[in-house]
Image (cartoon, grey):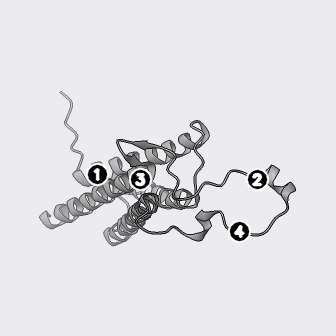
Amino acid sequence: MAASVFHPLDKKAAGLAFVLGLITIAAAWGSQLIGGLVPCELCLEQRLSYYYGLPLLLAVMITWNRLPLTVWYIAMGIVTAIFAWGTYMGAYHAGVEWGFWPGPTACAGVGEAMDFDALNNMAPVIGCDAVQFRLLGISLAGYNALISLGIVALLVVGIWAQTRHNRAR
């Protein structure tokens, strides 16, 4: 009879947060490369939390049992803060799309003067207030805010579980 393997809640929560983040950034790239959606400046900025947070979270997960506990808490706190910032960016972008507040001027397509020949070689510019896709009334920016919030919640659960586990020792 094989011995049962116990998987602590902290590792499960961090692993689920990583998988959720990886699926989300893969879907963002898929919507662009396969679906033909053109990301605006705020869309691209929202991806930064995945580009910074996921590699750091992966490093923490790889070195999980070898990290000093203080370093683990600091790293997990940084990853949580990165995704909290991603939550803010998604909510801010969704608010711009709904017209609750203005977006940055970079999203308005206002820029340097150019000649008409340069227009033939330009990539399309999408305003940050233009919604290219909605599902159940929520835009991709809104879903990103919700998913990022879910990642933050999972990371907080992981930190809480680690704290609880260490107090029980």
Query: Label 2 belongs to which residue?
Result: 122
- Cβ–Cβ under 8 Å for marks 4 and 1: no
Query: Label 1 belongs to which residue?
Result: 13
Q: CA distance from mark 3 to mark 1?
A: 19 Å
Mark 2 / mark 1, whichever is N-terminal:
1
Three-letter amino acid code of the residue under disc 1: Ala
Mark 4 / mark 2, whichever is N-terminal:
4
Q: CA distance from mark 2 to mark 3?
A: 28 Å
Residue drawn 33% across the image and 47% down it: 16
Q: Nearer the viewer, residue 4 or 75?
A: 75
Three-letter amino acid code of the residue under disc 2: Met
Mark 3 / mark 4, whichever is N-terminal:
4
Side of 88 relative to 121 (left or right): left
Three-letter amino acid code of the residue under disc 4: Gly
Residue drawn 49% across the image and 50% down it: 131
Q: Nearer the viewer, residue 99 or 153?
A: 99
Q: CA distance from mark 4 to mark 2?
A: 13 Å
32 versus 81 height, above or below: above
Three-letter amino acid code of the residue under disc 3: Asn
Please tell me whether mark 3 or mark 1 is closer to you in this view: 3
Please tell me whether mark 2 or mark 1 is closer to you in this view: 2
Q: Nearer the viewer, residue 59 or 32?
A: 32
Q: Position of residue 25 (x, y in %)?
A: 49, 48
108 versus 7 height, above or below: below
Mark 3 / mark 1, whichever is N-terminal:
1
Residue 148, picture quadrant: bottom left
- Residue 144, label in figure: 3
Query: Label 4 belongs to which residue?
Result: 111
Q: Position of residue 159 (x, y in %)?
A: 26, 63
For the N terminus, the quadrant is top left
